[in-house]
Amino acid sequence: MLAGKRILLIIGGGIAAYKSLELIRLLTKAGASVVPVLTKAGTEFVTPLSVSALAGVRVYTDLFDLTDEAEMGHIQLSRAADLVVVAPATADLMSKMATGRADDLASTLLLATDKRVLIAPAMNVRMWQHPATQRNLATLQADGVLVAGPNDGDMACGEFGPGRMAEPAEVLAAVEAALGTGVLTGRHVLVTSGPTHEPIDPVRYIANRSSGAQGTALAAALRDLGARVTFVTGPATVPPPSGVTVIRVETARQMLAAVQAALPVDAAVMAAAVADWRVANEGAQKMKKDGSGKAPALEFAENPDILASVARGTPRPRLVVGFAAETEHVVDHATAKRARKGCDWIVANDVSPATGIMGGTENAVTLITEHGAETWPRMGKDQVAARLATRIAEALQ
Ligand code: CTP
């Protein structure tokens, strides 16, 4: 999907530089030609030989390289590309970019280019969170620089948190999105995810066991196909994906408001586990024991049905997909739910505790459409997401 595209890939000096090798492989597999540039620090982590072997062309390493190539000076090199990608983008490279320094080949190319620049930051969590780096990030984003990641996770330095370079597949997706080559490019998709929290009083709430894993994987898969994704999430335990617009809510009613504000969309996928009921007599103050040993009586009110209101409202997305969390008679219940809610598809899953699906990493789903029920084998939630995203893309063709 990147046939004929030319990527200038600047590889900074960080432990994540090894991921740039896989990125070159993915970019070339997708049809792009990659012109690699290694910073001096980058050569400490990957060798020019491995980079040029994978890219199939020579690697540029410093300004001196260009002095004997009058026809391919740094200005031309920076402009012959369709996109400039910096992966990994170290704190130092980001700082140079933000201040416009040009003291080596990579920073000179970045200053001279007239093309869009995508960075995949990678650094220690404290360096990433440092106000100086965050300032530089804000400056770069204001300059129109695109950013993929960083992700949360264990870091090579032994710490945990944001700072890990986005995975090569995620950077590839960001490249495709930047170049507008994904099958869902130009489409806006709304995804709801996670549980809702319904307050009992200011310190207590009613929740459910949804982790948000399936909705998050789906948002990432749709983004990977080039969609503009609005991700409305309740208080999930998994972090939201990068490269999507994240709207955090707590209650079902807040989720409904956020969903309505996101319309119009081409497709809406409601993966959130929305609480059906909220506490009608929510305490304005913390409920106290009164010493009588009598438990307080909670009264409930029904929450709005977000899926049904989108499926039956205007502007109606071309495709409305609901999920059905069932513990018995999965296909029958989900088929009835599809009709009741007025959505196009229902992704049904058995969330009985024995299946380990709710809060787990795998899912076994049955897709219910107007043509009937289609049961998919049990697979990772990422794979379910990729398959569903592809089906959504086909439906929106
Ligand atoms: N849903 C919603 N708003 C609600 C409840 C559910 O938008 N108030 C959506 C969910 O996001 C999901 C679908 O409706 O896509 C089905 O959710 P589920 O909990 O399985 O169904 P319920 O509506 O709760 O129906 P039932 O109580 O019969 O299981």
Image (cartoon, rainbow, N blue to C red):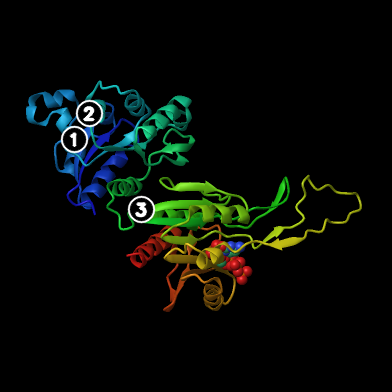
Foreground tag (3 vs 2):
2
Task: Note whether residue 96 is visible.
Answer: yes
Foreground tag (3 vs 1):
1
Quarter of the figure that contains the N terminus: bottom left
As helix, strand or loop, the secondary structure at mark 3 comes to helix
Q: Which of pointers 2 and 1 lies earlier in the amino acid sequence? A: 1
Quarter of the figure that contains the C terminus: bottom left
Q: Amino acid at mark 1?
A: Arg
**Residue at image mark 2:** 112
Q: Quadrant of residue 166?
A: top left
Q: Which of pointers 3 and 1 lies earlier in the amino acid sequence? A: 1
- Dots 2 and 1: beta carbons under 8 Å? yes
Residue shown at the point (78%, 58%) measured from the top left: 298
Residue 79, label in figure: 1
Q: Nearer the viewer, residue 232 or 166?
A: 232
Q: Separation of disc 3 and disc 2 at Cα?
A: 29 Å
Residue shown at the point (43%, 66%) measured from the top left: 319
Task: Say whether residue 335 is left or right of residue 297.
Answer: left
- Image x and y of residue 176, in percent: 29, 49
- Image x and y of residue 349, in percent: 52, 68
Q: Separation of disc 2 and disc 1 at Cα?
A: 8 Å
